[in-house]
Amino acid sequence: MNTSASPGGDRILPDGVTAAGEGAAAAPREGAVIPAQDPLSPSVPSSSAARRRPAVRAAAGGARLGTAPSPAAATGAATATVTVTPPTAAVASPTAASPDARSAAATAERPPHAAVRPLRRRARLVVATALRFEAMAAGRSGLPSDTIMIRTGMGPERAERAARVVREARPDAVAIIGLSGGLAPGISPGDIVVASEVRDLDGTVVARCASAPLLAGDLRRLGLTVHVGPIVTVAKLATGDERTRLAATGAIAVDMESGPIAAGAGDVPFAAVRVIVDSADQELGRVDLVRRGVVGLRTMRRLGPPIGAWAAAVGTRTVLLAEPRAFCAGVERAIEVVERALQLHGPPVYVRKQIVHNSHVVADLAARGAVFVEELEEVPAGATVVFSAHGVAPAVWDQAGTRELSVIDATCPLVEKVHAEARRFTTRGDTVFLIGHAGHEEVDGTLGESPGRIRLVQSAAEVDSLEVEDPERVAYLMQTTLALDEAAEVVDALRDRFPAIVGPGSADICYATSNRQNAVRRVAQEAQLILVVGSANSANSVRLVQVSERDGAASHLVENVGDVRLDWLDGVETVGISAGASAPPALVEELTEALSGLGRTDVAVRSVGRETVAFHLPKELRRAAAATPSSPASSPSSPSSSSASSASTA
């Protein structure tokens, strides 16, 4: 419920909706039955669908079929409305199929390694709304047809009575939806707020909504503007100074019902979704009261599918964390290089290309003064520039010298090892085949060590067409972030084609890539779904997805928790999580926390060993640190350390 001069009178109607007594689509009164959803048009309630199967009204307290209403019903308490699912349409639901058909379907869709699991009961979803027209909008939003709708009435006192109905309905998931007022700057009428937590007026946290980022992600994919943050519940409309005071507490929206309903939900997953109709800088007035109310109610009619998907994802599950995961030593070193450069030289510090392939890392450093450029022409002459962890060709060094740039080289020592091998092989006259992917910055840098003498090979299928001047003088190298089995196929093909070929003295695929792939394969043996945290341009993150898919687990690459689609989680009891070597560990923590908001969650680690590798900072920064005694010491350990220590596995 919005908290300034909000719409809410029965005369404010969205297009196609009429009040009771004014048309067939009358709004449900307390105790009225919201029609079942028409399977042929699931976003619009159908009275004919309701007639096909009887709908049964439960009096306050969620009375079972055939029982007498509770005393609360006689005293004007809120009423739960239960609708019976109508006959299925062309696509049968799992609950409507025969046991044999369900078993066959489950077997067909199950990954080869997955154990047979009993089908889960569909979560019982309770949706609360305050006002009559909010209930109408919710009823026509495409919510699951078996949703229990509870109209609370306006204000915390009525919501407290309705909370008893919520408890007695024995829900598996509870959501409250409706109109609301915005508090934080940047929140405008028409936006949506999904509560990360619900607070009372005194600041007490009534409920934490850990799954809010997941629900917000599904809403954003509808093209809606969504904010996630605290909602505060108050006893009366908040205006003027009171609104300013509430905003100062960190709450981003205010309503009058979420607190009591959240308390009534108890320990089951809870969501509060509010459509903003007024804000601090756009307060609601009499002139635009109707217009904003209508727009808000129309927006509410789009909320049903995401909320239904959220409820379908609710359940008990296990989360398996692959170990190692997230940042590797080379990435930590590269990030520290930029941070130290900013401390020493002050902003701006220019960085050629992304320092590592992760948008969160780049955005964080940019906010602190790093300027990311594609080419050195964008860097002012004489400025400080950092070369990224992926390495550069000698021609880039030459260009930096011509422009008199002060260069700090953040190239990963394991990438530099491949560059050194390329120079060694080509100097002795070998033709070098570089196994890798075209367009990757690491590949471009290695090819640039000897243009024309180093040739890119992307797959085993390309090997048969390769021709060289001297088949006895050939060598191969690898991009450090390849999939192990993918690279092995190409090496086998090269050895068959050129028996005299030689490879690097030690493996080119870096320890971090190998360890993360081995860890995710272990998790894939048990998980139904693998979520890999990383950016789309991160080669090692993409390889983790491909490796787990080859092992039979459904797998998705996600930039952050908001990229996870709720329908991926429907029926999934075991989720595996990994992260590419350039992904911040905090993103994994956020994803794990969000999944825990969907029900009881057990978290376990599947480890293939712990990494103890660290690299020295570049000489440019070590010299500067030596000249500045107050500077922090450089990273301990030697760049020659390149293997993970063993550890007991879970």
Image (tube, rainbow, N blue to C red):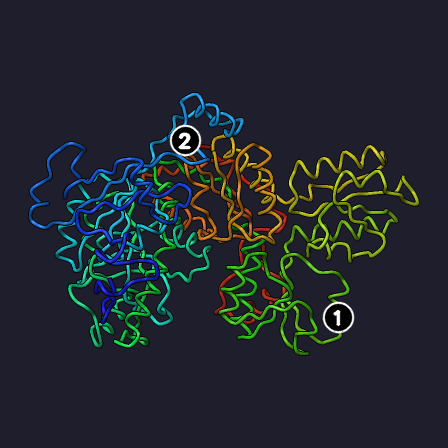
Residue 229 lies, in percent from the top left, at 33, 60
Quarter of the C terminus within the rendering: top left
Quarter of the N terminus within the rendering: bottom left
Left or right for 136, reference 109: left
Residue situated in front as seen by the camera: 473 or 291:
291
Q: Is residue 98 above or below residue 589?
A: above
Q: Residue at x 26, y 65 (%)?
A: 12
Left or right for 345, reference 170: right
User: How far apart, in angstroms, are the residues tagged by discs 1 and 2?
Assistant: 64 Å
Q: Quadrant of residue 283?
A: bottom left
Q: Residue at x 49, y 43 (%)?
A: 531
Q: Residue at x 13, y 33 (%)?
A: 67
Residue with the most extreme bottom position: 381
Residue 141 lies, in percent from the top left, at 35, 51
Label 1: element kind: helix
Label 2: element kind: loop
Q: Residue at x 25, y 38 (%)?
A: 55
Residue 94's tag is 2
Query: Contact, CB < 8 Å: mark 1 with mark 2?
Result: no
- For marks 1 and 2, give the one nearer the viewer: 2
Q: Amino acid at mark 1?
A: Gln
Residue with the most extreme right position: 469
Q: Residues within 10 Å of mark 2 (few under 14, many from 20)?
A: some
Q: Quadrant of residue 180?
A: bottom left
Left or right for 559, reference 50: right
Residue situated in front as seen by the camera: 515 or 28:
28
Residue situated in front as seen by the camera: 300 or 26:
26
Residue 31 lies, in percent from the top left, at 17, 47
In this figure, which residue is indicated by the disc labeled 1?
399
Left or right for 290, reference 225: left
